[in-house]
Amino acid sequence: MKLGLQLGYWSAQPPLGVPEMLVAAEESGFDSVFTAESWGSDAYTPLAWWGAATATLRLGTAVAQLSARPPTTLAMAALTLDHLSGGRHIIGLGVSGPQVVEGWYGQSFGKPLARTREYVRIVRDVLAREGAVVSDGPHYPLPRREGEGVTGLGKSLKPITHPLRADIPIWLGAEGPKNVAQTAEIADGWLAIFYTPRLAGMYDEWLDEGFARPGARRSRADFEISATVQCVITDDVAAAIDRYRPSTALYVGGMGAAEKNFHADLYRRMGYGQAVDDIGRLFRSGRKEEALAAVPDEMVRETMLVGTADEVREQIGLWEAAGVTTLMVTARDVQTVRALGELV
């Protein structure tokens, strides 16, 4: 079991205490650190800025959104950071959802599986640098030959800069069965959110479907499963649950439309269908306090590591037995980071 530190995306202001947490993570034997993006701070700038002060941590995005950058732009950022870090970059990608893709980036959300497959292939072609990058796919045509304003003068190119590694690992964020199966087929790792060891058997079925496909890139033996998890070492479990209850309500009720919310779908598969309906209805009607009250304690606790040090150690064992190779921990302070280093 490896440990990763999930710094996430910023809220209204940049988070405080990150340099100190990175020092603690590196000294405590953490394997990696990750940043994220939604519709505010981006993933790559903080990763490069804070990563410059590290020496051993792998530097990952969890996740960089597909619609934020064309695949060649993502590949440029990846090969640049990989050089600057001495080969420590992990590319973490995700499709986000229709509200963000169409509302923030102004792009179409349709065919997320096909877009992901094509995107990953182009990124790998850039990093391989075996020739000019060409894509006949419908989502990211290279060079572009038709469309309003196209001159027809586009030229197939390969990167000027030679990548340090031609095979930077690519991990994909995925929540549904088809997406997880494709992740096992084409990626080097799975970025799991709202993971619960209770459903490990279901996840294994999805993953095994991907591993069994012709031409699958990895097998279970060399595939990484990195699960984001909030960790609170405390004697007051109820207070810790209350602290994270708003986050659960937001993702279930506010991070997506009523017609399409991947986080809500995931919690339905976990057996919280009625709670999801209630939270979503209340959240979308502006009754946020009532939405928070509708979140069951276990719905929050099931995806957390919470309790005394001994209890958290026992919980970590359950996650490891379920097949998680990296715990990507969302910690709020240096003390928690150091404590986790001692527990794992």
Image (cartoon, grey):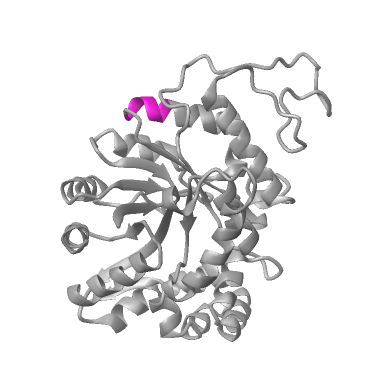
189 displayed left or right of 101 = left
Residue 57 rendering spot, x and y as whole percentages: 28, 41
Task: Check the image and report above or below for 249 versus 274.
Answer: above
Residue in the foreground of this view, choosing between 159 and 296: 159
Task: Check the image and report above or below for 229 versus 154.
Answer: below
Tell me which segment is drawn in magenta: 80-85
Residue found at x 61% / y 65%? 262
Residue 5 seen in the current view: yes
Residue 70 seen in the current view: no
116 displayed left or right of 12 = right
Residue found at x 42% / y 27%? 165
Task: Kindly indicate the quadrant of the structure image that contains residue 123.
Answer: top right
Q: Is residue 333 magenta?
A: no
140 displayed left or right of 223 = right
Residue 289 rendering spot, x and y as whole percentages: 48, 81
Looking at the figure, which quarter contains the C terminus?
Answer: bottom left
Residue found at x 37% / y 64%? 229
Q: Is residue 83 magenta?
A: yes
